[in-house]
């Protein structure tokens, strides 16, 4: 057996054991994992510093460095995320429905773990903890494969979690990290369909597409966020300005940050100069179409490539449209089906936008930055699903389960 096959077998064994645990045992383990993160903060920060310093030397962008950085506060936030998962209902054993057939069979449909989940992700060490905690809550073992930029951080985090499991007498192979960050090993992981039940990629659109194209393991697509904010002709412009700045600037490297602003022609002349100045004050480069540049000459001309690009950076592109129909058509053409928002005081426009936009999450008068497991009340999340099968939107513990039919008979045979 190769090393990955051994990990896969260990994960399957651990998943079987996890499936027998009750809520109390799982929650005790999660609390121990959270406490261990805080206790090991010094060691984790030291490991992260190695990754951060190397990434900085390699010229990594500021926004991506922010994703990589771990501080005592961020480690405490991760620990609190695990504690929030403890407070969530245990999805395992939940009965979705039950009935009796004409033949007298009693049937129930219950929630059960998926089994072994593979996580493959880029330089975001917080995913290591979020994924481990949520998979564990839902009774799944997890095999983690992070990016090379965060390898030292991920080793420190995963070892902390494994030791915590060992401390409470639970199979530590419920959480395993692949420490070989070569492309060859990543490819082998994506083909490990005899051991991994589902693979969840997190990262850039390009990274996710690569995984989708190469994997033999079933996939739940997450992450890529070319998110738009449409400012309608009936918008409250003060509200619009506040929302756009928050959605773009608060954390530009995350998948729910706004990448595009669509303006109705009727408010563009009034609103765009003010928006441009506010974005410039926050060091955001503004790109735009011909109409936008005619209003603010300093705007950088946008290319066709811009409309489909997730920047993950201090860049935003602006387009002016004649109607809400044009806005919806443009967004549905270029979005990644993640999160979209309309700013309007017109109820009919709001309902049209929310009904016709094809995305996992659609907002009225709110920042796209709320597309997040903790903000939705799920605690830590494993990702934002942008596909339509099995799960869509922020994925909590319930989305990491499947169902099983339990049929109770009393000697029935089919005639």
Image (spheres, rainbow, N blue to C red):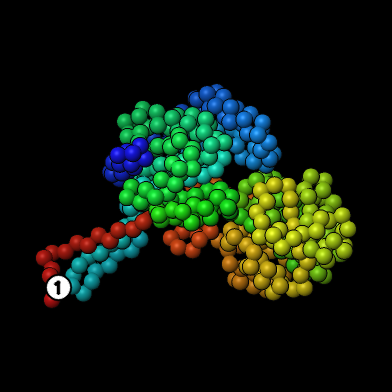
Q: Is residue 176 left or right of residue 325?
A: left
Q: What residue lies at 65% left-to-right and 34% top-to-bottom?
A: 58
Q: Residue at x 49, y 52 (%)?
A: 211
Nearest the eye: 235 or 190: 190
Work out which residue is located at the far left of the displayed protein and give it. 411
Instruction: Identify the element where label 1 is drawn.
Output: loop
Q: Residues within 10 Å of mark 1 (few under 14, many from 20)?
A: few
Instruction: Point out the image quarter for the C terminus.
Output: bottom left
Residue 332 coordinates in the image, percent (x, y): 63, 68
Q: Give the percent coordinates (x, y) of residue 18.
A: 32, 42
From the image, tell me which residue sits under label 1: 414
347 on left or right of 143: right
In this rendered view, identify the residue nearer to me: 408 or 10.
Answer: 10
Q: Quadrant of residue 240?
A: bottom right
**Image point 20% across, 67% down: which residue?**
105
* Residue toward you, 45 or 245: 45
Is residue 208 visible in the rendered image? The answer is: yes
Q: Image quadrant of residue 346?
A: bottom right
**Residue beneath the point at 52% across and 33% down:** 151
């Amino acid at each position: 057996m190769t090393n990955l096959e051994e990990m896969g077998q260990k994960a399957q064994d651990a998943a079987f054991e996890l499936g027998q645990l009750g809520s109390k045992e799982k929650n005790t383990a999660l609390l121990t994992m959270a406490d261990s993160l805080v206790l090991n903060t010094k060691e984790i920060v030291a490991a992260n510093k190695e990754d951060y310093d190397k990434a900085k030397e390699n010229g990594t962008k500021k926004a991506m460095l922010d994703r990589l950085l771990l501080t005592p506060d961020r480690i405490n936030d991760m620990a609190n995320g695990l504690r929030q998962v403890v407070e969530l209902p245990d999805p395992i054993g939940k009965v979705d429905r039950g009935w009796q057939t004409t033949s007298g069979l009693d049937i129930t449909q219950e929630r059960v773990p998926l089994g072994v989940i593979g996580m493959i992700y880029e330089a975001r060490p917080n995913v290591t903890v979020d994924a481990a905690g949520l998979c564990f809550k839902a009774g799944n073992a997890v095999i983690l494969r992070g990016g090379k930029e965060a390898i030292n951080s991920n080793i420190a985090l995963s070892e902390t979690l494994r030791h915590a499991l060992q401390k409470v007498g639970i199979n530590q192979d419920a959480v395993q990290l692949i420490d070989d960050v070569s492309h060859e090993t990543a490819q082998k992981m994506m083909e490990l369909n005899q051991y991994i039940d589902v693979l969840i990629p997190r990262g850039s659109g390009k990274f996710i597409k690569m995984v989708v194209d190469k994997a033999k393991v079933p996939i739940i697509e997450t992450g890529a966020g070319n998110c738009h904010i449409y400012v309608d002709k009936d918008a409250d412009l003060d509200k619009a300005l506040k929302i756009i700045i928050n959605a773009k600037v608060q954390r530009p490297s995350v998948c729910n940050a706004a990448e595009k602003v669509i303006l109705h022609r009727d408010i563009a002349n009034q609103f765009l100069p003010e928006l441009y100045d506010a974005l410039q004050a926050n060091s955001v480069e503004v790109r735009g179409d011909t109409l936008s540049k005619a209003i603010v000459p300093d705007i950088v001309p946008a290319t066709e490539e811009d409309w489909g690009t997730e920047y993950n950076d201090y860049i935003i592109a602006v387009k002016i449209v004649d109607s809400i129909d044009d806005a919806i058509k443009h967004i549905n053409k270029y979005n990644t089906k993640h999160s979209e928002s309309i700013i309007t005081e017109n109820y009919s426009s709001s309902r049209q936008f929310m009904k016709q936009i094809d995305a996992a999450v659609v907002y009225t008068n709110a920042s796209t930055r709320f597309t997040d497991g903790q903000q939705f009340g799920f605690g830590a999340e494993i990702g934002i699903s942008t596909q339509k099968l099995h799960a869509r939107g922020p994925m909590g513990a319930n989305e990491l389960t499947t169902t099983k039919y339990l049929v109770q008979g009393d000697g029935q045979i089919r005639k």
